[in-house]
Image (tube, grey):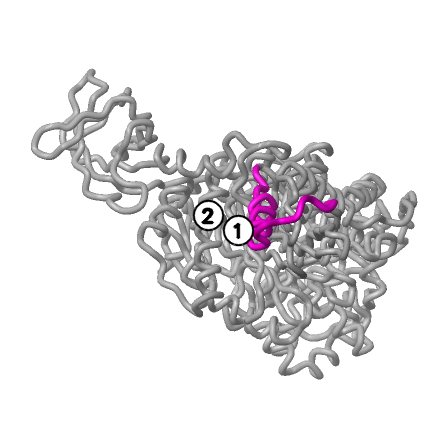
């Protein structure tokens, strides 16, 4: 059975140590810049260096997240940071920006790079393009089914990484503009404010799909603890836990449970998840339960946490008595009987009724008729209100063993690296002791001088073995010890102890030196070339109906006009491939995410697609189709979904065949109109919703089905956009 890695998150040193001690094979972490979780604690340069050394001594790999989009004026600093990570000993970089990836591949060719889930890769074809760009691993979009994952793994030698636990985004990663639109904090730039977790009022629509609560964009967390074996069998190289914003207790708890069942599967070929472990995962963090995501397709309403978008805790019972003015409340417990156990002192609870009341349990006594009296509840509650435990003091205490009283330099560690030893007897009675690290094949040796003649060779050998195994607080443990020859000398224990310390020190230094060393660091800079397209108005239509309604008025805009239409709409005859002679061009496009029936239709009718695209070219927003159309000889324009945010990315895509690159939606503003804020695999239906500040979101369905598109709902002035294109003498795009 192919080995599969368990990859855990670390938002700071304590979480890193917790992940290591809980059994992670690899840990991903971020520095102080260029990572998608800039609000996590993250690591200073010195902490990174210590973390890399700590991990290397224990055989744990470290992957540094540099998974944001990068401006031209930032690229030199970003590349220097990547170089520094390599120099300090990181095992790989997780990258979103294709421009940064191209620089790392060019100047640090032996530094492994992983394409982040922010790269929006959802297909085998996209993985193969990433492979051609030099990525050793691709972190797949979280919207794939098990069958789709299996197909991808079977079709590539590139390592595949899949999320198995933690928060889900309702939008495909890398395609979300909601946070930037509402507050200027971009998820693609590491500053997501999570507006998807807020409440929205339904304005109209959503027939047959009416949400249960107001948190209509908030999915539950994913939990694939029951599907680990299937993913391993599918060929997945790495199972990833989300959570760089989570506590060390969360990291330790979740990592240890996934470690347990991965080991069971490798050893026995199967497992049954114990109820205590299932409840421990629920207690440490859940949003009204868990989901298995899209493993078997869209789970529809079961995906969503529409009522409780935060940690929902575990149901423990109900209030049976509350006295006005008293902080003591009587409750009857009828839940939480597994794993963390009943309510305890120090638990954090939430009582849910007309209002949610949070309390720390500082008083706990048996009540009457089987009830329990708890305090300190400082706000009014009523009989019948539900009681939920948000955090368990006992679980927190148990999880603290993974990191408490431990730093990168001292502590009583659980995690050890196995070394094998051999003892060779020389002709002069001396002993050569060698320690070998089997995974990397690193060996160190030292010699013990001859001692007095041994009366009992077996006892002499046993004494040496006992001393060698006393590795104490070091990160090592001695595995096999092989004696080559008879030990016929009695060496003093103090000398064996000294030799053991010498060897362990040598091994530590050898492992620390075993990182890669990059070759020189160039300065990188990009001077953008002004692309003189002249005055062009691009009008982006989501469907043929809007095009038919508005196209007649586009012949007198006063500038060259292009109408952008879904390729599938044109293939199905809903719009013709018009040329400029008709007053405007019609140019087909494929969006950033065309997974599912849209891709299937294009693939099945690719010859027809090429014929239509060959008239005026085609805009392509994902890696899945860019190279395919370029190889077919079509004029291909890299569209916004490919997130071209700097000249280096543009060059990388041009090497794949793009004739021109349209900027990432990161550069969009209100003047672009109703541009996509989200694309979701979850099908909401058509409708409108309003946020707390009165902004209206429109929920659309992609023309070919299978996707939900969420856009602003604002009036669009096409002629004002045309005047701006004429004035600025450049291409202006507006989304209808």
Q: Which stretch appears magenta? A: 448-472
Nearest the eye: 227 or 689 = 227
Residue behind mark 2: 254
Q: Are marks 2 and 1 in contact (CB under 8 Å)?
A: yes
Is residue 65 at all visible to an observer of this figure? yes
Which residue appears at 84% of the width and 57% of the height? 109
Q: Which residue is mark 1?
A: 241
Residue neighbourhood size for the residue with mark 2, other residues' Cα within 10 Å, grouped as few (<14), some (14–19), many (≥20): many
Which quarter of the figure has residue 316?
Answer: top left
Of residues 675 and 412, the one nearer the viewer is 412
Question: What distance separates the C-alpha of mark 2 from that of mark 1?
Answer: 8 Å
- Local secondary structure at mark 2: helix
Residue at the top extreme, as displayed? 325
Percent of width and height locating residue 178: 58, 45
Give the image location of residue 659, x and y in percent.
84, 65
Q: Residue 439, position in %: x, y?
A: 67, 58
Q: Residues within 10 Å of mark 1 (few under 14, many from 20)?
A: many
Look at the numbered disc 1 and give the secondary structure of its residue: strand
- Tell me: residue 720, above or below residue 709: above
Task: Determine whether, in the image, residue 121 is placed left or right of residue 149.
Answer: right
Q: Is residue 82 left or right of residue 173?
A: right
Q: Tell us which disc is closer to us: 2 or 1.
A: 2
450 in the magenta segment: yes
Relative to the observer, which residue lies in front, 22 or 386?
22
Q: Quadrant of the C terminus?
A: bottom right
């Amino acid at each position: 059975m192919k080995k599969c890695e368990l990859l855990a998150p670390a938002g700071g040193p304590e979480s890193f140590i917790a992940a290591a001690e809980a059994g992670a094979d690899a840990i991903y972490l971020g520095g102080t810049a260029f990572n998608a979780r800039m609000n996590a604690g993250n690591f200073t340069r010195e902490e990174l260096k210590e973390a890399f050394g700590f991990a290397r001594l224990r055989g744990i790999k470290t992957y540094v997240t540099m998974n944001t989009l990068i401006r031209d004026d930032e690229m030199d600093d970003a590349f220097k940071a990547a170089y520094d990570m390599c120099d300090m000993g990181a095992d790989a970089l997780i990258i979103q920006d294709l421009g940064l990836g191209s620089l790392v591949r060019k100047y640090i060719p032996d530094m492994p790079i992983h394409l982040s889930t922010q790269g929006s890769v959802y297909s085998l074809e996209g993985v193969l393009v990433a492979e051609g760009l030099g990525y050793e691993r691709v972190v797949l979009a979280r919207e794939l089914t098990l069958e789709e994952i299996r197909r991808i793994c079977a079709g590539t030698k590139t390592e595949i990484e899949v999320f198995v636990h933690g928060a889900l985004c309702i939008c495909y990663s890398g395609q979300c503009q909601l946070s930037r639109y509402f507050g200027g904090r971009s998820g693609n730039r590491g500053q997501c404010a999570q507006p998807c977790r807020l409440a929205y009022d339904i304005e109209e629509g959503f027939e047959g799909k009416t949400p249960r609560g107001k948190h209509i964009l908030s999915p539950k967390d994913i939990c694939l603890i029951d599907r680990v074996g299937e993913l391993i069998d599918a060929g997945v190289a790495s199972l990833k836990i989300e959570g760089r914003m989570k506590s060390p207790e969360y990291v330790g708890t979740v990592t240890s449970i996934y470690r347990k069942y991965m080991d069971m599967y490798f050893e026995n070929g199967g497992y049954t998840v114990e109820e205590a472990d299932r409840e421990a995962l629920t207690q440490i963090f859940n949003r009204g339960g868990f989901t298995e995501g899209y493993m078997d397709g869209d789970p529809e309403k079961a995906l969503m946490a529409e009522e409780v978008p935060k940690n929902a805790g575990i149901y423990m019972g109900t209030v049976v008595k509350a006295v006005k003015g008293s902080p003591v409340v009587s409750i009857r417990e009828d839940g939480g009987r597994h794993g963390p156990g009943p309510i305890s002192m120090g638990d954090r609870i939430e009582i849910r009724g007309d209002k949610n009341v949070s309390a720390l349990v500082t008083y706990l006594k048996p009540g009457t008729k089987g009830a329990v009296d708890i305090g300190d509840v400082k706000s009014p509650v009523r009989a019948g209100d539900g009681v939920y435990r948000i955090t368990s003091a006992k679980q927190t205490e148990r999880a603290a063993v993974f990191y408490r009283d431990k730093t990168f330099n001292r502590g009583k560690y659980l995690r050890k690296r196995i070394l094998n030893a051999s003892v060779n007897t020389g002709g002069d009675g001396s002993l050569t002791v060698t320690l070998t690290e089997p995974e990397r094949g690193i060996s160190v040796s030292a010699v013990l001088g001859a001692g007095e003649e041994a009366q009992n060779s077996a006892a002499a050998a046993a004494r040496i073995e006992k001393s060698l195994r006393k590795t104490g607080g070091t990160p090592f443990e001695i595995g096999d010890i092989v004696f080559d020859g008879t030990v016929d000398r009695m060496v003093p224990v103090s000398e064996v102890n000294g030799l053991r310390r010498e060897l362990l020190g040598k091994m530590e230094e050898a492992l620390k030196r075993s990182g890669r060393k990059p070759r020189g660091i160039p300065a990188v800079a990009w001077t953008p070339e002004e692309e003189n397209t002249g005055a062009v108005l691009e009008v982006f239509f989501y469907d043929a109906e809007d095009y038919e309604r508005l196209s007649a008025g586009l012949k007198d805009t006063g500038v060259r006009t292009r109408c952008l239409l879904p390729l599938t709409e044109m293939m199905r005859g809903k719009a013709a491939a018009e040329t400029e002679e008709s007053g405007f061009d019609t140019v087909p496009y494929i969006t950033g995410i065309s997974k599912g029936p849209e891709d299937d239709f294009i693939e099945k009718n690719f010859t027809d697609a090429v014929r239509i695209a060959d008239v005026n070219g085609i805009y392509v927003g994902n890696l899945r189709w860019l190279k395919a159309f370029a190889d077919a000889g079509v004029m291909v324009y890299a569209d916004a979904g490919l997130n071209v945010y700097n000249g280096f990315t543009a060059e990388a895509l041009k090497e794949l065949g793009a004739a021109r690159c349209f900027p990432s939606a990161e550069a969009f503003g209100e003047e672009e109109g109703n541009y996509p804020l989200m694309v979701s695999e979850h099908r909401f239906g058509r409708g409108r919703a309003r946020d707390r500040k009165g902004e209206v979101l429109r929920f659309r369905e992609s023309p070919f089905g299978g996707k939900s598109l969420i856009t602003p709902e604002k009036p669009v002035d096409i002629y004002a956009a045309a005047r701006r294109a004429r004035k600025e003498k450049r291409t202006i795009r507006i989304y209808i």
